[in-house]
Amino acid sequence: MIPALRTLAALSVLLIIVQARNTPLSIPLKQRITTNADLVKQTLHAVSKRTVGDYTLVPEALDAGFWYGNFDVGDSKNLSLLIDTASAAVVINPSLYCESPAGTKLNSSGQPGLSGYVTMQENGCGLTRIAYSTFEDTVSMAGLTAHNQTLAALTSVTPPDNGTITWPPHDGIVGFSGVSPGDSWFGGVPFFQSLCNEGAVNKCRFGLALGTDGTGKQILGGLDSRLFQGYMDHIPANTSREFAFIGDITINGTVVSSNQHIIPDSGTANIVAPQSELRRLFASLGVQAVEQNLPGCGPMLFGYYPCDAPPRVGLQFGNSAQSFDIEPSAFQQADNGNNNCTAILTGIAFGTEPKWIFGQAWFQGKYIDFDQSGEKLGVARLRAKSERLPH
């Protein structure tokens, strides 16, 4: 999910291992399958908590293609916030933020700020325009607290048209991108960087390890090599711009489009591509390309293929010959019946800065390592569950 006012770039997360002062915490997340593609506005909160050794397990939820963690923000408890690796702000939906005694309102003028996000829906559409006031307050996740965290408390506004959304699903968003003030559109230090700055985690590094069965893990504060197999490929990444990097698009392991601008984005459900590149890709695959105009998107390019024969499309980077493909089980965006499926890839006219946004559909089956201090991104294939060491 990308902030709309600065070329912005939101997953299946089922467990969060937090390396906090030598005490790892893990938060299991529960997937909830839904056939409703509309934005779901109800909150799904933790229902139980148990401790196993050094691990604290707290059920969480996935809904409509996006993953949510449980957070306390100020005096607001158990907020279900979308985990987004391609934005940098903490955003709380209207009427949900309760300021704590430690909280401070920052914009004393009383005039709300204006910003927004794109790729808010499962098909890559969904333009959001939001109005907000800024505060500093505590933000906590799994017992880790960022103090004096800048956040945006949204105000309810009337949508300007039927295609514009005025607040995110569930209770809001926590951006995990960015390393400094200014990476967030209202100037606050991003949440994970606040944890790093305050010494709440051992290393300024987090990861997402997402299975193809709706289960997975988020790792905060280090690398968990037990979760992946083989060698982890690394590529230099721009940690202040959504961990963007340069990669090559592959078909059946062969590079077909080189030196593409890639954004890994857990806040986008599908894979969004420049239309010109995607037309060539669909033509190479024999995929039927159809352009449609949808609310919040404008012209969109979709592809249709036989459900029983998903093509192999992937990503390669650096000096490695490994191709990290979209898993066959994740290639389908929709089943239209009669062995006709909509591909997970969607084309958007990006204008002057063409880019690929690789969302949670690509994350599945992989361990994605976001190393902020090392300014690099790592990718490896997940181990089979039977091969992983017990926690």
Image (cartoon, rainbow, N blue to C red):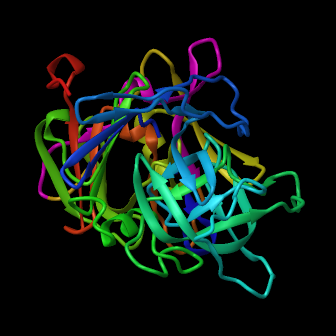
Viewer-closest of 225 and 136? 136
Q: Is residue 331 magenta?
A: yes
Q: Which residues are magenta?
A: 319-347
Q: Is residue 204 magenta?
A: no
332 left or right of 240?
Answer: right
Instruction: State the residue at coordinates (87%, 51%).
Output: 162
Residue 227, horizontal then vertical, whole percent: 20, 34
The quarter of the displayed image where residue 136 is located: bottom right
The outermost residue toward the front is 101
Residue 85, horizontal then vertical, whole percent: 44, 56
The quarter of the displayed image where residue 375 is located: bottom left
7 left or right of 27?
Answer: right
The outermost residue toward the top is 338
Instruction: State the residue at coordinates (42%, 59%).
Output: 145
287 left or right of 376?
Answer: right
Instruction: State the residue at coordinates (59%, 78%).
Output: 186
Viewer-closest of 254 and 113? 113
Residue 268, horizontal then vertical, whole percent: 53, 48
116 left or right of 16?
Answer: right
Residue 231, horizontal then vertical, whole percent: 9, 43
Asked whether residue 277 appears in the rendered view, the answer is no
Instruction: State the residue at coordinates (31%, 61%).
Output: 200
